[in-house]
Image (cartoon, rainbow, N blue to C red):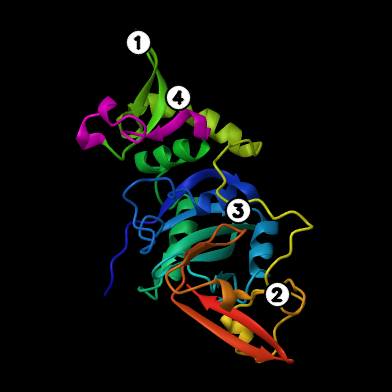
Amino acid sequence: MSTHPPFRKVFAGVATRSQMFALFNRHSDKPGVDPLSGKAYASEWFEIEASSYHFMLGLLPPLFQRTGMFGMSEYKAGNVTSVFFAVRIRGRERWFHGFCDLSDKRSPDAMRAAIVAYETGAVDGMTREEKLEAIWSAIDADFRGIAGETNPDAWPPEHHGKRTILSYVAGKGTTLKLLEDLTDEEIDSRMPAVHARSRRGGATMRNHRKPPPPADNPGWETYSIYTADLGVPDRCQYRRTPLGSPNVADLVRPGDTVSTSYGTGGVVVEVKEYLALKRKYGCFRT
């Protein structure tokens, strides 16, 4: 039986699509995070818009799908993947995203139950840890950082890698402070602003998605193993390039690190080349 950390809400309010993509990568700038395990993301969840739920459903063939739930076929890392939920709570349809560790096959259902319990008040309000996560997610990237990342001498070694934010301290003015050292009074004083920014969609988070290439730059043809195994590439879903242009199999090698325009990525573990309709197509698996 596998174990996983407690399910935790990491964003106050309903995340817009851009906020959702930023939350997909919210640990990417943390030192010491293993990018291949996905453990930093496992069991985190937040509420999203209906349009984001349906956008993600149509993006890739789901890993699994049943009423009110589907999983992304492209894993975040390790055994961790995105699971999206459509849940009716007190007569109103709402939508959520969570990272589930599928080494525990029950984790999607357990997360759904945890979300319902939290949102219906069957459990207490936000915990201290959840409030800290909400504060961190909502604060502008210019006003937060990682202890020791820029100047190792500014922090004791035991604090290196911990999250810091700018905070006003009486008698000292504005200074950097460890997020975990915020007092309960400081946390409670920040929460109204966090909720207000979430309601108006104003939370600013660093977005790690690469900008799309200029229109006059040729793209390279790319296909998932899922569609390639069908024998005929899905031309309605993927971009095309002229004959003779390099495809994925020409450009990608096992061990390469790749990322997508919608905030996911990983390390390539397999590259295949297919011949369909007298053309070669490359695909890879992470």
Spatial CA distance of label 4 from label 1 is 18 Å
Q: Earlier in the sequence, mark 2 or mark 3?
A: 3
Q: Position of residue 227 (x, y in %)?
A: 64, 83
Q: Which residues are magenta?
A: 139-159
Residue ID at (49%, 58%) = 116
Q: Which residue is mark 2?
A: 245
Residue ID at (45%, 37%) = 136
Q: Is residue 185 left or right of residue 141?
A: left
Spatial CA distance of label 2 from label 4 is 57 Å
Q: Position of residue 123 (x, y in %)?
A: 40, 50
Please identify the residue farthest to the top as the structure is shown. 171
Q: Secondary structure at mark 1?
A: loop
Spatial CA distance of label 4 from label 3 is 25 Å
Residue ID at (63%, 38%) = 199
User: Number of marks in the image?
Assistant: 4
Q: Which residue is mark 4?
A: 189
The numbered disc on residue 172 is 1
Q: In the rendered image, which quarter contains the N terminus?
A: bottom left
Spatial CA distance of label 2 from label 3 is 39 Å
